[in-house]
Image: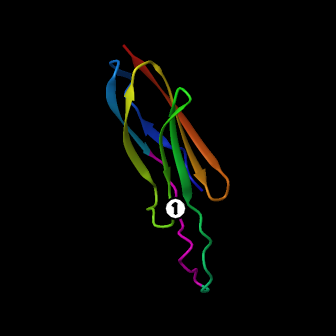
Amino acid sequence: MASKPRVKVPKTASAGEVITIKTLISHNMESGQRKDKDGNLIPRQIINKFTAEFNGAPVFSADMHGAISANPYMEFTAKVNESGTFKFTWVDDDGSVYEDTSEIAVS
């Protein structure tokens, strides 16, 4: 199970500026390859998909697999030409979806 995601997006930018966006979600990311104390495989449960949209348009996406570390951190850049809203979505193997948004003002 994951906790509330954290995102860092600049509050303001100039038109056409390339900004850096950072995201982190706390999640144990069980690979499905470890065994419990009784020798049974622990089922895989990872964040398997991350997407970022700006004003409804895709900006960045990543498919994650069993080798991803716990608490996945994503850092990427995006060029902003207008004010708007970034929407971030993380999808868990169990079907859980975690979302966060962040506003940016462009001048």
Residue 73's spot in the image, x, y percent?
Answer: 41, 50
Q: Quadrant of residue 30?
A: bottom right
Q: At 58% from the left edge and 83% from the top edge, which residue is drawn? A: 37
Foreground pick, 101 / 48: 48
Q: Which residue is mark 1?
A: 28
Q: Amino acid at mark 1?
A: Asn
Q: At 62% from the left edge and 86% from the top edge, which residue is drawn? A: 38
Task: Read off the magenta span.
Answer: 24-37
Residue 63's spot in the image, x, y percent?
Answer: 51, 54
Residue 41's spot in the image, x, y percent?
Answer: 61, 79
Q: At 52% from the left edge and 47% from the top edge, which residue is drawn? A: 50
Instruction: Say left or right for 46 vs 81.
Output: right
Foreground pick, 19 / 58: 58
Q: Is residue 42 above or below residue 78?
A: below
Q: Is residue 101 magenta?
A: no
Label 1 SS: loop
Foreground pick, 74 / 40: 74
Q: Quadrant of residue 72?
A: bottom left
Label 1, residues with CA under 10 Å away: few <14, some 14-19, many ≥20: some
Q: Is residue 10 above or below residue 95?
A: above
